[in-house]
Image (cartoon, grey):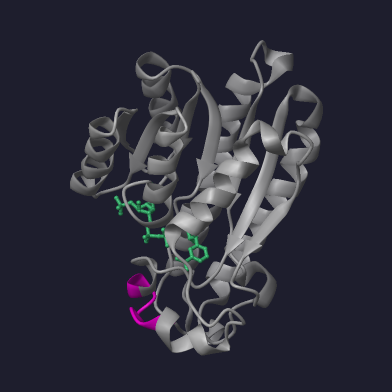
Amino acid sequence: MNKTILITGASRGIGAATAIQAAALGYQVGVNYLKNEEAANQVVDYIVRNGGKAKAFGANVSSEREVDELFKAIDSTLGTVSALVNNAGILETQMPVVDIDVERLCRIFNSNVISCFLCSKEAVKRMSTKRGGSGGAIVNVSSIAARTGAPGEYVDYASSKAAVDALTLGLAKEVADEGIRVNGVRPAFIYTDIHTSGGEPGRVDRIKDSIPMKRGGRPEEVAKAILWLLSDEASYTTGAFLDITGGR
Ligand code: NAP
């Protein structure tokens, strides 16, 4: 395989697991991170030690300028992106809607929604067969919160993920005849650092007995679904969502 993939927020959690599995499949992997350069370099080192090709790229994917520079840097080092995983996302401390201030809303929507729009735009410019590209695939990492609303915890985050789902549906239809597929995954209760940002590091263990499978999920289990949606095995799948929730 000689394909280049960009995974946003790949220094940790679901993004890191996806980067490692993508490299094992033969992708050249752009490992994006925001602040945690050391963790991103560890992902890259692991991939290279195992015979793969990867490079770390620091960029805030909610900044138009930094996304523009990120894609240009990948063009000139790993080659043009033909797969994109919009994975970077944030969660803030649990609180009811009545206490959420506008600064927090801007942070959540910038990090979780604007980022997906900006990276998807740059990807479509390069992938679209109508613009001289060779096609490609995009997977947006949403959340089951888009369906539940996350009452009392983080309705702002849930709303941002519902916006990501609308982007997935709309963009999938816009570019379906340009050689680009766009799909989403909606994980829940995955063991990563994000729950610490939400103020409850042990959240998955607190909830796990209410999950039909009676356990939390692993980042690697989400990565498998993302990589299937990107693969040619999913060649007639677009505008679709895979819920990865242990049955909840
Ligand atoms: P995580 O462990 O907290 O990792 C978040 C990653 O996103 C880190 O690599 C972080 O980089 C990066 N990031 C955050 N903001 C960024 C920005 N503006 N620009 C570039 N990178 C940025 O999170 P995770 O649990 O793996 O979550 C990944 C995705 O899955 C998110 O979209 C999340 O909403 C979604 N999700 C997670 C769960 C779950 O249970 N874990 C459930 C549903 C959905 P640094 O390391 O540099 O900070």
Q: Residue at x 69, y 47 (%)?
A: 168
Q: Residue at x 48, y 62 (%)?
A: 108
Q: Which residues are magenta?
A: 196-203
Name the one closer to the observer, 194 or 222. 222
Residue farthest to the left, as pictured: 38
Q: Position of residue 197 (x, y in %)?
A: 34, 71
Q: Is residue 173 left or right of residue 120?
A: right
Residue 76 figure quarter: top left
Quadrant including the C terminus: bottom right
The kind of secondary structure the magenta stretch mainly shows is loop
Q: Residue at x 46, y 68 (%)?
A: 190
Residue 191 figure quarter: bottom left
Please determine whether, in this image, residue 46 is positioned above or below residue 187: above
Determine if residue 64 is in view. no
Determine if residue 56 is in view. yes
Q: Position of residue 192 (x, y in %)?
A: 37, 65
Asked whether residue 199 is drawn in magenta, I would say yes
Q: Position of residue 92 (x, y in %)?
A: 41, 72
Asked whether residue 128 is drawn in magenta, I would say no
Please determine whether, in this image, residue 95 is positioned above or below residue 21: below
- Give ligand 1's quarter of the image: bottom left
Q: Position of residue 34 (x, y in %)?
A: 31, 47
Name the one closer to the observer, 198 or 40. 40
Please determine whether, in this image, residue 97 is positioned above or below residue 35: below
Residue farthest to the top, as pictured: 132
How many labels sit on residues? Answer: 0
